[in-house]
């Protein structure tokens, strides 16, 4: 892109070309456009220098940091003074070489550069700001704002006529455009984040049930079990399991449960009878039997199962003796630690349980850690104590959210059917 290059020494136009040897020469730097940029920006430098000195003064007594600020202050002061001298010299050369600048706008530019340079000298000599230097800084800042509007935003020159309304209006347009662009970028970022979250949600595992829903089911369960003397337990159990499965998503696929109370009723009778005969020993076998029955009626929602249908590709293949071992260990550890170790024991038991679940030919895995649930567990215990147990449904929901967020599908496994 060719820019007019004005040589201050000879007044010749270099035509926007670099020097013949391919290196950037002084003439390539001292173009008319660059000099006008420097003259326009010079009015901002006194305020910048004043702020720098005030900041340096604040940290002057701080060890090491104060020394760093002092060195930076000296270096930047030298740069500012050099820039002001260059602006004054550049303004003088431009006016002497270009008749279009021998106008009110050109003389304003040169005058602003001189006042700005004088102000920098006062600030440097005084070591800081005072009312006079502050007032001069505001005047040169106003002049700089007008010149920068003409030279930078309107792509004009310092010779262009001064029109304060037009020149200041440019900033309003610029700010509006910047705000619109910022809003557009934010909207794009939010859209991208929403798309990323949606994509992640399609492959994520989570539980989206709520405590208030579970509370309603618990109240209904208590009422039905009470008025039927416990005979409704198979149906209320299926009701809560169906609600739990319907709010469970594994790797983006929602679960559904087809078990019916009538199917579970006969199993309940068998489990209760055998537990009584064995003085409670069979209750451990009953838990594993129940998990097997529950898994056999668990589908992914997109498989559209019929009510009561058995999924021959789903199973629970954990054995009772493993469950007994884990139950004994977790009970002992929880007792010895006054349940402080519950999150860790829960993670261990959950890992065993999930690793033995196969849903539609895909084995599940669990990677949750007890430490991840510890904070939530403590909060749940405190809230349950304060509310006399009313918070329990919310605590169960939080446990499910943690558990299923760390549950994933593994590779397909060999399937088989059972009844």
Image (cartoon, rainbow, N blue to C red):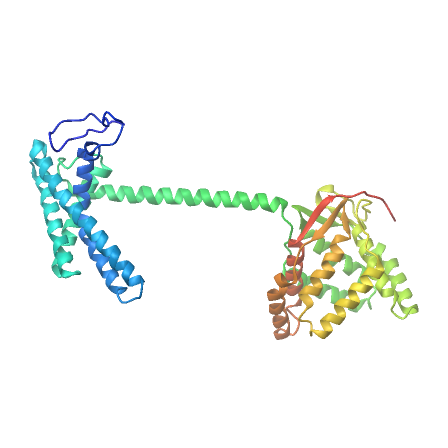
Answer above or below: position of 275 versus 366: below
The outermost residue toward the right is: 277
Q: Position of residue 329 (x, y in %)?
A: 77, 67
> Residue at coordinates 62% horizontally, 65% vertically from top-left?
374
Q: Is residue 4 visible?
A: yes
Residue at 85% from the left image edge and 54% from the top image edge? 263
Q: Quadrant of residue 158?
A: top left
The x, y position of residue 399, in whole percent, is 66, 61
| Left or right side of 76 for 256 | right
Horizontal side, residue 339 vs residue 19: left or right:
right
Location of residue 80 with respect to 323 vertically, above or below: above
Circle count: 0
Viewer-nearest residue: 214 or 296: 296
> Which quadrant would residue 389 be assigned to in this image?
bottom right
Q: Quadrant of residue 21?
A: top left
Residue appearing at x 63%, y 66% in the figure: 377
Judge whether residue 232 can be spotted in this image.
no
Query: Residue 116 location in percent, x, y?
Result: 13, 49
**Image quarter of the N terminus:** top left
163 and 102: which is toward the camera: 102
User: x and y percent of residue 43 in the render?
Assistant: 17, 48
């Amino acid at each position: 892109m060719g820019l007019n290059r004005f040589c201050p020494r000879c007044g010749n136009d270099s035509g926007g070309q670099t020097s013949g040897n391919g290196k950037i020469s002084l003439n390539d730097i001292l173009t008319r456009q660059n000099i006008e940029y420097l003259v326009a920006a010079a009015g901002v430098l006194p305020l910048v220098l004043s702020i720098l000195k005030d900041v340096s003064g604040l940290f002057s007594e701080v060890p090491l940091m104060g020394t760093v600020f002092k060195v930076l202050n000296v270096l930047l002061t030298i740069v500012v003074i050099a820039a002001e001298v260059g602006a004054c010299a550049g303004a003088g050369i431009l006016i002497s070489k270009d008749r279009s600048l021998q106008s009110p706008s050109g003389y304003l530019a040169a005058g602003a550069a001189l006042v700005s340079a004088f102000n920098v000298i006062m600030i440097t000599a005084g070591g800081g700001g005072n009312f006079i230097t502050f007032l001069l800084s505001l005047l040169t800042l106003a002049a700089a704002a007008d010149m920068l509007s003409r030279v930078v935003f309107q792509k004009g020159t310092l010779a262009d006529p001064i029109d304060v309304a037009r020149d200041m209006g440019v900033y309003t347009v610029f700010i509006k455009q910047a705000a619109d662009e910022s809003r557009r970028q934010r909207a794009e970022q939010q859209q991208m984040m929403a798309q990323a979250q949606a994509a992640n949600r399609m492959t994520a595992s989570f539980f989206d049930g709520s405590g208030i829903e579970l509370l309603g089911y618990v109240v209904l369960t208590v009422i039905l079990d009470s008025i039927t003397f416990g005979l409704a337990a198979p149906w209320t159990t299926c009701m809560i399991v169906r609600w739990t499965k319907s709010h469970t998503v594994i790797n983006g696929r929602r679960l559904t449960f087809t078990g019916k109370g009538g199917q579970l009723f006969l199993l309940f009778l068998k489990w209760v009878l055998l537990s009584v005969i064995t003085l409670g020993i069979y209750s451990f076998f009953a838990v594993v039997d129940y998990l097997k029955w529950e898994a056999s009626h668990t589908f992914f929602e997109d498989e559209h199962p019929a009510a009561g249908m058995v999924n021959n590709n789903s199973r629970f293949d954990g054995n009772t003796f493993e469950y007994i071992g884990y139950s004994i260990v977790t009970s002992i550890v929880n007792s010895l630690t006054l349940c402080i170790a519950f999150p860790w024991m829960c993670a261990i038991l959950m890992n065993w349980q999930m690793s033995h679940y196969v849903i539609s030919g895909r084995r599940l895995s669990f990677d949750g850690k007890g430490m991840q649930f510890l904070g939530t567990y403590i909060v749940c215990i405190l809230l349950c104590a304060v509310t006399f147990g009313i918070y329990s449904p919310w605590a169960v929901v939080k446990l499910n959210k943690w558990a299923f967020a760390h549950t994933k599908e593994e590779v397909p496994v060999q399937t088989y059917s059972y009844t």
